[in-house]
Image: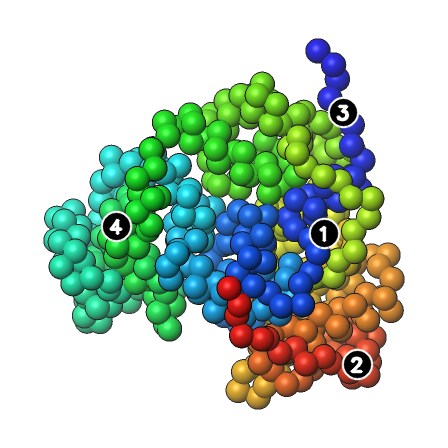
Amino acid sequence: MSRPEEMSAATARRTVLAAQGFTDRPHNRVTMRTLDRALVRTGVLQIDSVNVLQRAHYLPLFSRLGPYDTTLLHRAAEKRPRRLVEYWAHVAAYMPVELWPTMQHRMRRYRDRGHAWGGDKGRPEIADDLLREVATRGAVTARDLDPATQRSRDNWGWNWSETKYALEYLFLAGELTVARRNTAFERVYDLPERVLPRAVLDLPEPDPAEAARALLRRAAASSGVATEASLRDYYRMGVAETRTAVHELVEEGTLEPVTVQGWRRPAYRHTAATTPRSIRAAALLSPFDPLVWERARTEDLFGFRYRIEIYVPAHKRVHGYYVLPFLLDDAIVARVDLKADRATGRLLVRSAWAEPGAPRDRVAAALAEQLWSAAGWLGLDTVEVEPKGDLAGVLAGVVDRAVPGSGGVEPAAV
């Protein structure tokens, strides 16, 4: 057996960035077709409730497409013909509707475990009652079915009631799905047959081994090159099923083993992955972007140590509350703590930090352009840089001198 091909770290980075869509030709006007292309690249969009800047699932598309009409994503996830559905595909995430059959074995595991997954938080018989109620009433939130007086105040940030636990069990078990999120960002639950396209519901369910291979193919296509652990993390699969599926995908010719200089573990490249000679990109990255959501992989790829500090007490934070890495070409060169101050129309840069060796003047110029673009996309009028971080001074000067573009978004096109 021949030795695996050796890739340089730079080659691996370019391969990954191409797989994630950072080399796709930009469009002046983002259409549903453009959005579809980006969704194929990312595979899933992680959902997170933090809204200090913009909710997590919107940001990866902005990073790849620039300013776009977010109603496109709403249409893809909520309107016919539905392209996306919410499920626990990475963590809570939007996934392509055609992945529904490949998640059935995962849903069955929840059904087999039963309502006991919630421990002593609820009574099992509630789930059956709620399923009948949703079938009768149609799409509802937990709040619609559960008076506020029944909600627990013991768990900060969640405050789940017995009803909410039961609805979440039904969601994980595939008995209910999410029709949409309401303006309070609450899940609106409904029966799968009233949400998903009939053609998707009629697709045959693959056996668990086939489902594992299907998920790994998608993870590999979105990753370009990755370790087994990274491939497993993309759709949060089990160790044994991933190891078997990786071996089978090597045998079928979808994956090929490689070694990447500086990586501590063997890797696999998708045989259809492309490696451009260079990358020309500038993008603010969400903390939950697929490019950086696995922190060990981010460190291997970019030499960038990244930790989100939302849950760290303010006085112990190093870089800030909601810190976005800044990608320039094929390197992460800076990080900025951002806040959308919607009441005053300002995009606040609470701190700005350059990576060691980054060319600060060039980084600041490119970053300022992206900050103005983000501000326009978010409907904010100004960008204000606060004096914290080793890049803040030069960035403030560039931002103040910059002449922002319109940042406006044309109405969505089909």
Q: Earlier in the sequence, mark 4 or mark 1?
A: 1
Q: Which mark is residue 402?
A: 2
> Separation of disc 2 and disc 1 at Cα?
26 Å
Name the residue type under label 1. Thr
In the picture of the structure, the residue carrying the numbered disc 1 is 23
> Separation of disc 1 and disc 3 at Cα?
24 Å
Residue occupying the point 79% across, 68% down: 366
Does the CB distance between marks 1 and 3 fall below 8 Å? no
Identify which residue, 138 or 232, lies in the foreground.
138
* Front: mark 3 or 4: 4
Q: Secondary structure at mark 2?
A: loop
Does the CB distance between marks 2 and 4 fall below 8 Å? no
In the picture of the structure, the residue carrying the numbered disc 4 is 193
Q: Position of residue 54 (x, y in %)?
A: 53, 69
Identify which residue, 76 or 29, lies in the foreground.
29
Name the residue type under label 4. Glu
Q: Which mark is residue 64?
A: none
| Left/right of residue 371 with respect to residue 289 in the rendered view | right
Pick out the residue farthest to the top.
Answer: 1
Q: Secondary structure at mark 1?
A: loop
Q: Position of residue 160 (x, y in %)?
A: 28, 61
Q: Earlier in the sequence, mark 3 or mark 4?
A: 3
In the picture of the structure, the residue carrying the numbered disc 3 is 5
Name the residue type under label 3. Glu
Q: Earlier in the sequence, mark 2 or mark 1?
A: 1
* Front: mark 2 or 4: 4
Q: Earlier in the sequence, mark 2 or mark 4?
A: 4
| Classed neighbour count for the residue bearing mark 4: other residues with Cα under 10 Å, few (<14), some (14–19), many (≥20) | few
Residue occupying the point 80% across, 35% down: 8
